[in-house]
Image: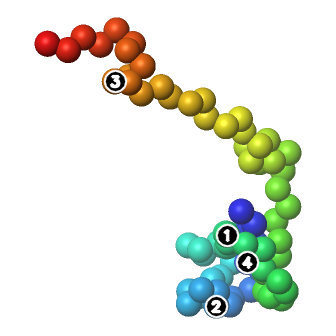
């Protein structure tokens, strides 16, 4: 998810954003095109990039359907 540092006061998504305020940094689901002059894009660090490329979760077998030692009475 793209992040933007707030450089000056401005509105985004109906919320007043200001430097160091409650809503700084601004995180969006899609990149902003064009980026408003009062925002500055934050480049992701290598650690953040590794988080984005995590392994897919392993498939969990259904314990009722695989006859994994569950006995019915």
Quote the CA–CA distance across marks 1 and 2.
17 Å
Viewer-closest of 26 and 73 = 73
Q: Position of residue 52 (x, y in %)?
A: 74, 47
Tell me the element at label 3. Answer: loop
Q: Counting residues from the N terminus, which is met first, the one under dot 4 or under dot 2?
A: 4
Q: Position of residue 21 (x, y in %)?
A: 60, 75
Q: Name the residue carrying label 3.
A: 64
Q: Are marks 4 and 1 in contact (CB under 8 Å)?
A: no
Q: Counting residues from the N terminus, which is met first, the one under dot 2 or under dot 3?
A: 2
Q: Picture quarter containing residue 56?
A: top right
Q: Counting residues from the N terminus, which is met first, the one under dot 3 or under dot 1?
A: 1
Q: Name the residue carrying label 1.
A: 29
Tell me the element at label 2. Answer: strand
Quote the CA–CA distance across marks 3 and 4.
52 Å
Viewer-closest of 19 and 63 = 63
Q: Is residue 64 visible?
A: yes
Image disc number at residue 37: none
Q: Position of residue 54 (x, y in %)?
A: 72, 39
Callout in the foreground (2, 3): 3
Q: Is residue 61 left or right of residue 44?
A: left
Quote the CA–CA distance across marks 2 and 3.
52 Å
Q: Name the residue carrying label 2.
A: 11
Locate the C terminus and report the quarter of the image it occupies.
top left
Quote the CA–CA distance across marks 3 and 1.
38 Å
- Residue positioned 83% across, 71% down in the render: 41
- Crowding around mark 3 (Cα neighbors within 10 Å: few <14, some 14 to 19, many 20+) is few
Q: As displayed, is residue 30 above or below residue 59?
A: below
Q: Name the residue carrying label 4.
A: 6
Callout in the foreground (1, 2): 1
Q: Counting residues from the N terminus, which is met first, the one under dot 4 or under dot 1?
A: 4
Locate the N terminus and report the quarter of the image it occupies.
bottom right
- Residue positioned 73% across, 77% down in the render: 6
């Amino acid at each position: 998810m793209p992040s933007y540092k707030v450089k000056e006061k401005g509105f985004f998504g109906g919320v007043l954003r200001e430097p160091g305020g409650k809503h700084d940094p601004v995180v969006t689901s899609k990149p902003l095109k064009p980026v408003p002059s009062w925002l500055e894009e934050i480049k992701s660090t290598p650690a953040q990039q590794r988080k984005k490329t995590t392994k897919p979760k392993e498939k969990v077998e259904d314990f009722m359907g695989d006859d994994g030692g569950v006995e019915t009475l």
